[in-house]
Amino acid sequence: MSNTVAESVENDLLRGLEALELDLSAEAVGRLLQFIHLLAKWNKAYNLTAIRDPRRMVSLHLLDSLAMLPWLQGDNVLDVGTGPGLPGIPLAIARPDIHFTLLDSNSKKTRFITQAVLELGIGNVSVVQSRAEAFQPDGQYSVIIARAFAGIPEMLDMVKHLCTARTRIIAMKGQYPTDELHDWPTGFVCESIEALKVPELEAARHVVLIHRERT
């Protein structure tokens, strides 16, 4: 990444954080910038994301992920189908007080995440290579997040064994997920669907907040 591009990436990130009203430490901002640098570098060889331009990665990956922060409550988060660490890595950098487990079945993506966590010195992330439906963790999760992973009914079926009555599920979607709401699986309740405004991103974004039915 050239110095000119790196400077533009930093300026884009700082403007986006201001728009989101996020006051992150200089150390956190530096790690987010390093993450983009690593992702762009590895992407050339391993095709981790379809986004090639580091400046577009700021809005489509970093800011898009960080827009979920207002709904993140709890101390133990599972990021299902994390891909190259999204949204888990940006969220973990922003919230070092929360432990994140990043789950994906793709070995090249989990290798990248493992290397990124090591190089960036992120101490609150565990990386697991597994399919969601086969994953058997030792503990329970306060929050399960999914971004660009699967349709809501399919996703809920995959993670139902990981949920307790206290687990909140946060699914990030593009357009309002009208069709997916028609096939809502039994045993789960949609709390609300919130529209997001992601800086420098014209496309629609929504978060769907879900929990298990409480008897």
Image (spheres, rainbow, N blue to C red):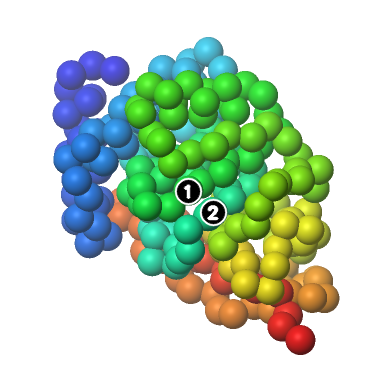
Picture residue at 70% right of the left edge, 67% below the top: 164
Q: Residue furthest bottom?
A: 215
Give me the C-alpha separation between circle 2 and circle 1: 6 Å
Q: Quadrant of the C terminus?
A: bottom right
Q: Compared with residue 9, is residue 98 higher up or lower down, i.e. above or below?
A: below
Residue identifier under label 1: 99
Q: Which sits in the foreground, 45 or 141?
A: 141
**Could you tell me if residue 113 is visible in this image?**
yes
| Label of residue 21 in the image | none
Query: Residue at point 48% right, 73% down?
Result: 194
Q: Position of residue 31 (x, y in %)?
A: 29, 33
In this picture, residue 92 sits left or right of residue 16 = right
Give yes or no for contact between labels 2 and 1 (Cβ–Cβ under 8 Å).
Answer: yes
The answer to which image quadrant residue 83 occupies is: top right
| Residue 56 percent location from the top left of the image | 36, 37
Marked residue nearer the N-terminal end (2 or 1) = 2
* Residue 65 visible: no
Residue drawn 52% across the image and 66% down it: 207
Q: Relative to residue 97, is residue 214 depicted above or below?
A: below
Instruction: Please tell me which residue lies in front, 18 or 137.
Output: 137
Work out whether 64 lies above or below 175.
above
Horizontal placement of 123 versus 18: left or right?
right
Provide the residue designation for mark 2.
77
Q: From what the image shows, is residue 80 above or below residue 51? A: below
Q: Amino acid at mark 1?
A: His
Res 118 → quadrant: top left
